Structures are given as structure tokens and as C-alpha cells.
Amino acid sequence: MQYSVSDFLTDIVQNSIEAEASVITVDYIEEFPMLNIMVGDNGKGMDEETLAKAKDPFFTDGEKHKNRKVGLGIPFLIQAVEAAGGEFDIKSDVEMGTAIEFSFNLENVDCPTEGDLASAFRSLLLFSGDYEILINRIKNGKSYRVTKSELKEALGDLESADSLNLAKAYFESHENELSGKGE
Amino acid sequence: MPKLTLDDLRKLREEKKHEIEKRETEGKDIEIVIGMGTCGIAAGAKDSLEAFLKEIDKQKLKNVIVRQTGCMGYCSNEPTVEIKMADMPATIYGNVNADVASKIVTDHIMNKKLVSDHVFDKPSVDIIKK
């Protein structure tokens, strides 16, 4: 079970990377009391039958863990969303990609904590492979957006401790500003 | 903290430029791979990652790269971390909390001494790239 919304986000983006996406978009939009998150990718996608099964905890393609008979990422997300007065939707096309949209009601007592968003956003940049990711963040009318390639260009790399610490500071400073904690 | 722009990041990075140049001549020959699947995160891999970055910064190590991967197949021993470097066997450590992470940096990476209590076996075949 995931502890925070950040963890769900990381997990879903990791699915996109495992689906061999080269471009991933993340919209993380807070309009109190609703939190809407959309993750879109141009990965290998799923046909209708597989898509239906992806919501079944006892289905897995078996590629990642040969002896494991469960696939819990999406089912856990659906369960958490439903428990917290939110919605879940997934659309997919073979060879086109997958789009997942989910929401939480932040006022709902069963809504998971958002977690450390700055760390989570940074984590989205660090999976292995050559992919682009666009993070679009909106909170109560204020916003920022940044891509992995922009950060990589500014920092020179995204694998040294210096760069990773600066990348987190970047997200933290932007999150602080959105929360009115900046300056 | 004032809002950092991409330009600020460039400047901050520029300030460390001589260090970067040094790193480029030395080569980035130490690799830390942290398992950040659901199981890893549930077991505290985010804290371990933070601890690695903090210790590398504190020890001013410049030739280390940090990557994350999905589940390594050792869910019961998460957080798991693989260290690859010259003069040491490629090693997977299990149950790497923040304290163990700092110890891996000082013992394994800096002093080339295994952190024996946390050494785990060889990598799971399903994470090895074909």
C-alpha cells in the first residue's frame, strides 16, 4: 500500500517508463479541495482486454516478476481514490500510449497525505532511460512548469549529488512559493 | 528560500565548475543504484536516497553518480542499493536505512571496505538489462 499521493504518482510514472514511453506529461493540479493528477505517455499502450485487466489485482503481465501473480499498482490507486472521494480514469491505445487521470478530495478524512512533492518530482527525472518528462504544477491559480531536459541543460547532468540536491532545491523553492512560504 | 529559476541553477552549477572539470578528468566511476519501487519506497528508500546525497555532499565526493531503479526483486530486504566501482565487487546491500547509507559512503566507497552486515547476494536476473 502506498503511503502518500507522491508515491502513487511515482509508481504511475514508473509504469509509463516501463511501457517504453519517450515522452511523459504530468499535470499536478490542486484546486482546493480537489487534487487532480494526470499522467500521459506515448508508451506501448494496452488493448481493451489488457486495459480492463490492469484494474484487476490478480493480473500481471509477469514480465517484471516472473513468479508473482499479482499486479497491485493500479488496483491500490483505485482503492485509495475511491476511499477518499476521488475519481479514477484510464485510457489507452496500443502503440499510442496511456493516459491516467485521478483525483482526491483533500478534505476527505481518508485522503492520503501528499508527501514530499519536491522529492517526488525530482524522482520522476531519475529513472534510467532516455525519456522526456514535463511537469505542470498548478496550485490555487499559481503555477510553474518545467521539463527534464530544461533541468538537465541547466544543471549539466542529472546524476551527480550536486545536481540532484539542486534539482530538489528547485522544486522546493517553487512549492514554497505556491504555498505562500517563499521569499 | 527565494524561488530558484533555471538561470539560478545554471549559476549555482557554474560556481562548482572547477569541481565539475575535476570530475570530468577523474571520470564518474562510482555508481549507486537505489531501488525505488513501491516496496523500496514503503521501506524508506526516499530517506536512503536523501542520506546518500547528503553524505556524498558532506564528503565532497565528485565522481559518484546516483540512479534509481524499480523493484530489484528483493522486496523483503528493501531498501536495496547496488554499488558499482573500481577495485570493489559489484555489491548489493539490503535494509539500507539512512545510517547504513552514510556508512556505505564512508566505508565501501571511501575506504573500500564492505559493510558486511548488509551485504546481499548477486543481482536478481530480472533487473539485468539484456
Image: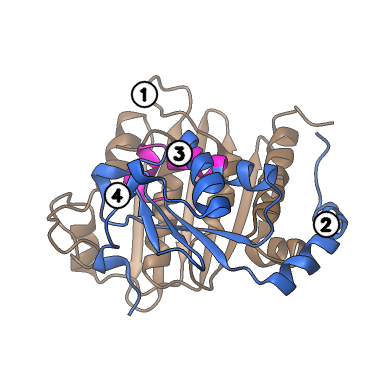
Q: Secondary structure at mark 3?
A: helix
Q: Nearer the viewer, residue A146 or B19?
A: B19
Mark 4 or 1, nearer chain start: 4
Which subunit holds the residue at mark 3?
Answer: B
Which subunit holds the residue at mark 1?
Answer: A
* Amino acid carrying mark 4 in the image: Gly
Establish whether labels 4 and 3 are both on one chain.
Answer: no
For label 1, the residue is A110
* Disc 1 versus disc 3: nearer the observer: 3
* Disc 2 versus disc 4: nearer the observer: 2
Q: Nearer the viewer, residue A126 or B24?
A: B24
Q: Are marks 3 and 2 in contact (CB under 8 Å)?
A: no
Q: Nearer the viewer, residue A173 or A76?
A: A173
Q: Is residue A178 left or right of residue B42?
A: right
Q: Would you identify the image quadrant in which residue A141 lies?
A: top right
For label 3, the residue is B100
Q: Secondary structure at mark 4?
A: helix
Residue A105, percent from left and from top: 45, 30
**Image point 36% across, 23% down: which residue?**
A110
For label 4, the residue is A73
- Using the numbered discs, state the Cα–Cα distance from disc 2 to disc 4 in whole angstroms: 40 Å
For label 2, the residue is B16
Report the magenta stretch's main SS. Answer: helix
* Amino acid carrying mark 3 in the image: Val
* Disc 3 versus disc 2: nearer the observer: 3
Magenta stretch in the rendered image: B36-51
Chain drawn blue, letter?
B
Chain drawn brown, letter?
A
Q: Would you identify the image quadrant in which residue B58 lies?
A: top right
Q: Is residue B34 above or below residue A17?
A: above
